[in-house]
Amino acid sequence: MIPVQSSHVWHVGHDPETQTLFVRFKPSVKHPAGRLVQYLGVDADTAQRVIDAPSVGQALHSFVKGVFEMRG
């Protein structure tokens, strides 16, 4: 997982073997350690687009949320 510049996302990582995108959101009262979410079936190109995006949150909404299965 690597830290990213975002108002809501803290770290993003990708496992190419399992095609899992890991997103840790910044800490909150409900999730003091930061909520960890996994998106399943995410290819390496899509993961890199999210990581490299000027707005990680916007990229998550555009390319990942509602497209890939979420856990967490």
Image (cartoon, helix red, strand yellow):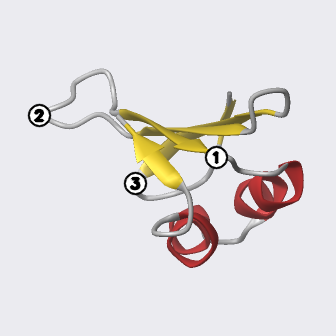
61 left or right of 29 in image: right
CA–CA distance in space, label 3 to label 2: 13 Å
Number of other residues with Cα within 10 Å of mark 1, as a class: few under 14, some 14 to 19, many 20 or more: some
- Using the image, determine if residue 44 lies above or below residue 53: above
- Using the image, determine if residue 19 lies above or below residue 69: above
Number of other residues with Cα within 10 Å of mark 3, as a class: few under 14, some 14 to 19, many 20 or more: some
Q: Kindly identify the amino acid type of the residue bearing the numbered disc 1.
A: Val
In the picture of the structure, the residue carrying the numbered disc 3 is: 8
In the picture of the structure, the residue carrying the numbered disc 1 is: 4
Place of residue 3 in the rendered image (x, y in percent of width and height, measured from the top left): 64, 36
Q: Quadrant of residue 53?
A: bottom right
In the picture of the structure, the residue carrying the numbered disc 2 is: 29
Rendered-image quadrant of the N terminus: top right
Answer with mark 3 or mark 2, whichever residue precedes in sequence.
Answer: 3
- Using the image, determine if residue 1 lies above or below residue 38: above
CA–CA distance in space, label 3 to label 1: 10 Å
Residue at the extreme left of the image, as rendered:
29
67 left or right of 16 in image: left
Q: Secondary structure at mark 3?
A: loop
Q: Quadrant of residue 12?
A: top right
Q: Residue at x 68, y 47 (%)?
A: 41
Q: Kindly identify the amino acid type of the residue bearing the numbered disc 3.
A: His
